[in-house]
Amino acid sequence: MSSGWPPWSRRSGHGVTTAPIRYDRLPRGKDELAAWVLQVGANGIQILEAVYAAGAPLRLRELPKVQVLRRVWVQQYWTQEDGALAWRGPKSTRDRQSRHDTPRRRTTPEAVRGRPDPASARVPWAGLEILSPHDPEARFCRKGGATAASPDKAEWIGYRDHQSETCDDDGPNVIVHVVTRPAPEQDIDALEAIHQGLATRGLAPREHLVDGGYVTPDTIHHAATRWGTTLLGPVRADPRGAQRPGFTKADFRIDWQAHTLTCPRGVTSPPWKPATGDGRAYLSVLFPRQACRACTDRLACTGNADGKGRHLTLLPEPLQKIQTQTRAEQQTRQWQDRYASRAGCEATVSETVHAHGLRHCRYHGLAKTHVQHVLTAAGTNIIRLAECYPPGTTPDQPPRPTSPFQQLCRRLHTPLPD
């Protein structure tokens, strides 16, 4: 260990206690930064080797800080075949977690078995990667839809808060339930925990207005059958509808008994075939190529110019019926008027974030952060109730005493006698 301490102490300036490392202190050049990162990695490995040496006390390797160091170094560094230390590259944006266990063409045997490809080793997924030694449970999240007016929606490190509030017209709307989850976890994955918590407290709603991130035909069906709750929210439109402006999936007639589709021009498809994608079952329907080639609406319907037949995918029967019905209903004025109450929930998010500092964590760890989220919701409720029912507005409430400041303002406002 002695050979490693002098250069480390010169870099840190505080002996073996390192100074805080900030981005503005990092080397500017690309090569200098890479060399600095590898040197830091070598120092960390030197510590881990000493802690896990045969003669080292066993209690050292059980220290939480040592465990965090070990996990971070495994996530950020790897050893090449020649024994040289290498820094892992960033995650591949085109990678998909659902394909990790599926053999693919044009890939290495190591990648198929789940091991990193030596030519392109990547850091782990956001759900596993430690980003702060001060809070090992905090995770990185990037959320689309950010604008210049609200850049804080783009990305953050921490947690995700799910608030459920009432939306009645005869009183103040209050937050009744809070769920705190890791930041990378999508909204739809927290919906079951939300409904479970509401049902446990006897607050299961008959109708639950939610953001589009919580809504799929599957969640609508599950909420109705498992909790007796009508999930009201926009189902995503056909992502490829713009490529096929002629006919959408709703324009085709489905025969669930014969397992066929009939297009608006009267052509019936062969029986569909079951298929699986991203771990979900669906039905694959392919129309005859010859029939589509002879159709005058081919380009507008199929969206291609190479003469292929129209291909559609259907969900299982109950889910497909929900998708078709919801997509049609959400275009009506009646549905939009019902869903307009959801705007109040967006106002609650804005209030708790900008007025009460919801996204500025004062604690470390998911459990303590959840306590902060609950206290923030409780404080928001107190403010709303106080503003809705101020003292002295009802017969059973005494008037609020006049504060010294109000008394001073009244004396200043009273004109002086001549």
Image (tube, rainbow, N blue to C red):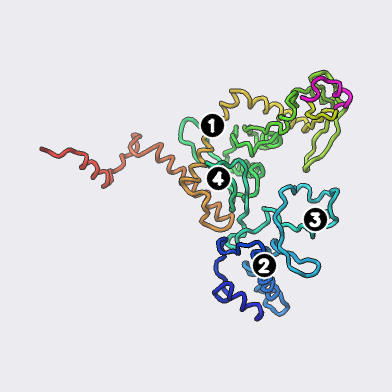
In primary-sequence order, the first of circles 2 and 1 is 2
Q: CA distance from mark 2 to mark 3?
A: 29 Å
Q: CA distance from mark 2 to mark 1?
A: 56 Å
Indicate the amino acid at tag 3.
Gly
* Mark 2 element type: helix
Number of marks in picture? 4
Nearer mark to the viewer, of 2 and 3: 2
Q: Which residues are magenta?
A: 286-300
**Residue 288 is a magenta residue:** yes
**Residue 272 is a magenta residue:** no
Indicate the amino acid at tag 4.
Pro
Nearer mark to the viewer, of 3 and 1: 3
Question: What number is the disc on residue 114?
Answer: 3
Nearer mark to the viewer, of 2 and 4: 2
Identify the image quadrant of the N terminus: bottom right
- Residue 375 x/y as whole percent: 49, 49
Indicate the amino acid at tag 1.
Ser
Q: Is residue 166 left or right of residue 273?
A: left
Residue 63: image quadrant is bottom right
The residue indicated by pointer 4 is: 151
Question: What number is the disc on residue 35?
Answer: 2
The answer to whether residue 93 is visible is yes
Cβ atoms at labels 3 and 1 below 8 Å apart: no
The residue indicated by pointer 1 is: 341
Q: Residues within 10 Å of mark 4 (few under 14, many from 20)?
A: few
Q: CA distance from mark 4 to mark 3?
A: 36 Å
Q: Residues within 10 Å of mark 1 (few under 14, many from 20)?
A: some
Q: Residues within 10 Å of mark 2 (few under 14, many from 20)?
A: few
